[in-house]
Image: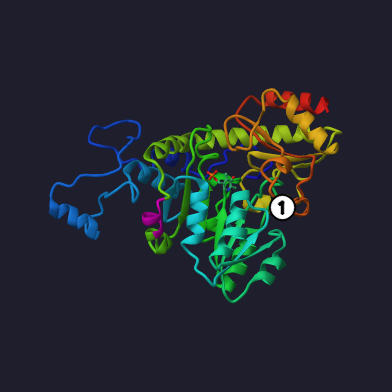
């Protein structure tokens, strides 16, 4: 579909069905809903059976740090959605990012990353990796020449987010993956903002996709979770031992919540995209707003790329208030329905002032590089009635 036509279904054929049924491991009891295997360990019928499991001759479960049937159902369901050979679920999005990077890298390697990264991702790339001898270069991800120029013989990984947080700028996945292939580097894409429905990085040449499942996949603000998706050879390569022995595993309880979240993901994201379109329109109509950033709008700087790369404009809207911090705080403090929170992807609409919260750690110059001003506000648009959201936004704009 065209991203300007929000009335169309955002899912590819079969996806909505797969998200309800794929991966279910139905027990002999014949339960309708997926079973929650809330167990840390597993018992064996004999010492010989235990030996065979540990030798890997029998692929049953050993310990929930290695694998668990409820977690496996979640992994299978999301792997099918992503079109990935496999998935490894983790306890948070950051555990997924950390595993995707650390399991691939060693001292002497080099990482190139787009600097518009989620704050904790930027900490890993900028502060943590160099402590272990992995050099990193942060660049403007929208500038293709900058990716090329940053490549060194020892470059092993390209890491990026698109759309970026919070200004929703896009990076050309086909082009960046092409540069990486030439450089012999792997591309890791943090696809949280796009959701697995709206953008398929593996189809554009990415090697690994990571999610914070805490966001749209849970979608109801209940639990943390994450997932790494990619080829079997990657997941069963160095990542396998990393996963088993460093303990980023997802709790079966949270896996069950996320599995149920996947069932309703298309319904929620479709509604969120439609609501985001309406909210962006209301923002753009206000004289208090100097710039509205929504990838589904023709006035977005990366609109043409969004048309090629995404199936809809997404659930996030960013905008700049001409009145700076005072205007932004007036706006946030007047909102009634939309709550102030740094979370995103929730059924509930949430508003953030990045300069004083999520991006507070950065210097003013670093924020300026990312085009985060004192008047920048980020909205994560939920599934409420569009008219109620627009009314809340209009009342808050009027109070500035
Ligand atoms: C939230 C988020 C993360 C981290 O996920 P957690 O589940 O909070 O650990 C990483 N990347 C992006 C883009 C996010 O929005």
Q: Is mark 1 within 8 Å of ligand 1?
A: no
Q: Secondary structure at mark 1?
A: helix
Q: Residues within 10 Å of mark 1 (few under 14, many from 20)?
A: some
Instruction: Look at the image and tell me in which quarter the N terminus lies.
Output: top right
Across and down, in percent, residue 272 comes to: 61, 34
Tell me, yes or no, whether the highlighted magenta stretch contains residue 33. Answer: no
Tell me, yes or no, whether the highlighted magenta stretch contains residue 246. Answer: yes
Q: Is residue 205 visible?
A: no
* Front residue of 179 and 345: 345
Position of 371 compared to 192: left or right?
Answer: right
The magenta stretch is 242-247
Across and down, in percent, residue 88 comes to: 42, 51
Q: Residue furthest front?
A: 131
- Report the residue at 57% width, 41% height from top: 10
Vertical side of 208 occupied by 20: above or below: above
Q: Is residue 145 visible?
A: yes
Position of 359 compared to 186: left or right?
Answer: right
- Report the residue at 79% width, 29% height from top: 330
Vertical side of 188 occupied by 262: above or below: above
- Report the residue at 39% width, 41% height from top: 251
Q: How many marks?
A: 1
Vertical side of 212 occupied by 207: above or below: below
- The picture quadrant where one finds residue 329 is top right
Q: Main secondary structure of the magenta part?
A: helix
Position of 53 compared to 201: left or right?
Answer: left
- The picture quadrant where one finds residue 158 is bottom right
Across and down, in percent, residue 61 comes to: 27, 49
Across and down, in percent, residue 250 comes to: 41, 44
Q: Which residue is mark 1?
A: 304
Instruction: Look at the image and tell me in which quarter the C terminus lies.
Output: top right
* Front residue of 267 and 27: 27
């Amino acid at each position: 579909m065209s991203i300007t036509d929000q009335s169309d279904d955002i899912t590819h054929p079969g996806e909505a069905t797969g998200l309800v049924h794929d991966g279910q491991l139905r027990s002999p009891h014949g339960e309708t809903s997926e079973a929650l295997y809330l167990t840390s360990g597993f018992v064996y019928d004999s010492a010989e059976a235990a030996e065979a499991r540990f030798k890997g001759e029998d692929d049953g479960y050993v310990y929930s740090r290695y694998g668990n049937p409820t977690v496996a159902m979640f992994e299978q369901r999301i792997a099918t959605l992503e079109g990935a050979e496999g998935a490894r679920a983790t306890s948070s999005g950051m555990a997924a990012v950390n595993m995707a990077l650390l399991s691939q890298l060693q001292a002497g390697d080099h990482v190139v990353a787009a600097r518009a990264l989620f704050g904790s991702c930027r900490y890993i790339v900028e502060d943590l990796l160099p402590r272990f001898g992995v050099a990193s270069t942060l660049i403007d991800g929208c500038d293709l020449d900058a990716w090329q120029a940053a490549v060194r013989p020892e470059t092993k990984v390209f890491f990026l987010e698109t759309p970026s947080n919070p200004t929703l700028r896009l990076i050309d996945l086909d082009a960046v993956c092409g540069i990486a292939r030439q450089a012999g580097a792997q591309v890791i894409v943090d696809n949280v903002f796009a959701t697995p429905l709206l953008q398929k990085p593996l189809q554009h040449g990415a090697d690994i996709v990571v999610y914070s499942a805490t966001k749209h996949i849970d979608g109801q603000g209940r639990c943390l979770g994450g997932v790494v998706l990619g080829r079997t050879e990657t997941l069963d390569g160095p990542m396998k031992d990393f996963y088993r022995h460093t303990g980023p595993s997802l709790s079966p309880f949270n896996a069950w919540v996320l599995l149920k979240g996947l069932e309703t993901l298309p319904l929620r994201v479709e509604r969120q995209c439609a609501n985001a379109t309406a909210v962006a329109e209301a923002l753009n109509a206000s004289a208090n707003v100097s710039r509205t950033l929504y990838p589904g709008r023709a006035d977005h700087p990366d609109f043409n790329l969004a048309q090629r790369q995404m199936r809809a404009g997404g659930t996030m809207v960013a905008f700049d208030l001409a009145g700076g911090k005072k205007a932004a705080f007036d706006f946030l403090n007047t909102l009634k329905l939309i709550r102030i929170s740094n979370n995103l992807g929730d059924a509930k609409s949430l508003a953030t002032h990045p300069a004083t919260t999520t991006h507070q750690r950065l210097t003013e110059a670093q924020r300026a590089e990312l085009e985060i001003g004192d008047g920048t506000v980020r909205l994560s648009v939920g599934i409420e009635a569009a008219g109620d959201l627009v009314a809340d936004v209009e009342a808050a704009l009027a109070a500035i």
